[in-house]
Amino acid sequence: MKNTLGISLIKLLTFPLPIIFALFLNEVRSLRFKRAIQTISYLPHFLSWVVLGGILATWLSDIGIINHILMGLHLIDEPISYLAEPKYFWTIVITSDIWKELGWSAIIYLAAITGISPEMYEAATIDGAGRFQKMWYITVPAIKATISILFILAVSGVMSSNFDQILVLRNSLNDSASNVIDYYVYYTGISQGRYSYSAAVGLFKSVIAITLLLIANQVSKKLNDTSLF
């Protein structure tokens, strides 16, 4: 439970990053440069965690590129096997998740931004507003409903820790930091054959997720009149 909530709540704190990325990407005037950034940021999403897990395991090994860079900068004196150290596991999970999903998560915000009338920006320009002022006073309020809906869905997923990612990156050495509820259900049900017990644990997680969804939906409805239902 500690690992599940810890990883999920930290991921929830990174929720604004795709919004910020979309806002700044929208301000890029060079169409070619903008497309290049979009392609580079979207690409990791289309790679499975099996592939990315292998890449990360290679990069983070004793002889991996991360250790070479850090030792070259004299930040560490000897190589560190990052995936063998529980204290690094949460950081690796959060960072790799951001790397994989940041560009893809920004798509829906970019789509919402394209629906804003250009006349609003033109009027703001005439009034002397700068880019950041237009971003804060026009773009953000215009996509507030989209942000609220996606945040409600993100809150409801707090009890999930991306099973594919955890399964690929975990090992017996980092078990104390990587044993989340999703993996516990898988291990208990498949490896130990305790199907009824693992089903009960999964149902418990689903009940909490529905409860969080209802709470987040009601809070959003009261604060900004936006909700799923």
Image (tube, rainbow, N blue to C red):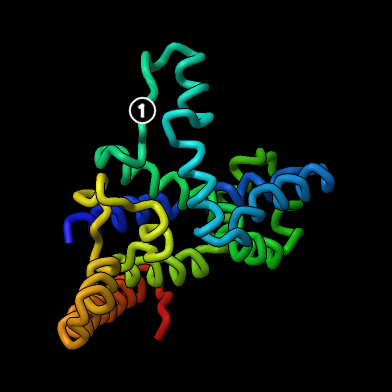
Where does the image place residue 71, in percent across and percent down from the top left?
Answer: 46, 16
Quarter occupied by residue 81: top left
Q: Residue at x 70, y 51 (%)?
A: 38
* Residue placed under numbered mark 1 in the picture: 80
Viewer-proximal residue, 219 or 191? 191
Name the quadrant of the C terminus: bottom left
Viewer-proximal residue, 23 or 179? 179
Quarter occupied by residue 129: top right
Where does the image place residue 131, in percent across and percent down from the top left?
Answer: 66, 41
Q: Residue at x 34, y 62 (%)?
A: 161
Where does the image place residue 122, in percent across and percent down from the top left?
Answer: 76, 52
- Compared with 210, 47 (above or below) is above
Q: What amino acid is at disc 1? A: Ile
- Compared with 145, 194 (above or below) is below
Can the viewer see residue 124? no
Viewer-proximal residue, 162 or 54? 54
Label count reads 1
| Classed neighbour count for the residue bearing mark 1: other residues with Cα under 10 Å, few (<14), some (14–19), many (≥20) | some
Q: Residue at x 33, y 76 (%)?
A: 217
What secondary structure is marked by label 1? loop
Q: Residue at x 17, y 56 (%)?
A: 2
Quarter occupied by residue 173: top left
Where does the image place residue 11, in percent across and percent down from the top left?
Answer: 37, 54
Name the quadrant of the N terminus: bottom left
Side of 41 where 50 appears, left or right = left
Can the viewer see residue 118? yes
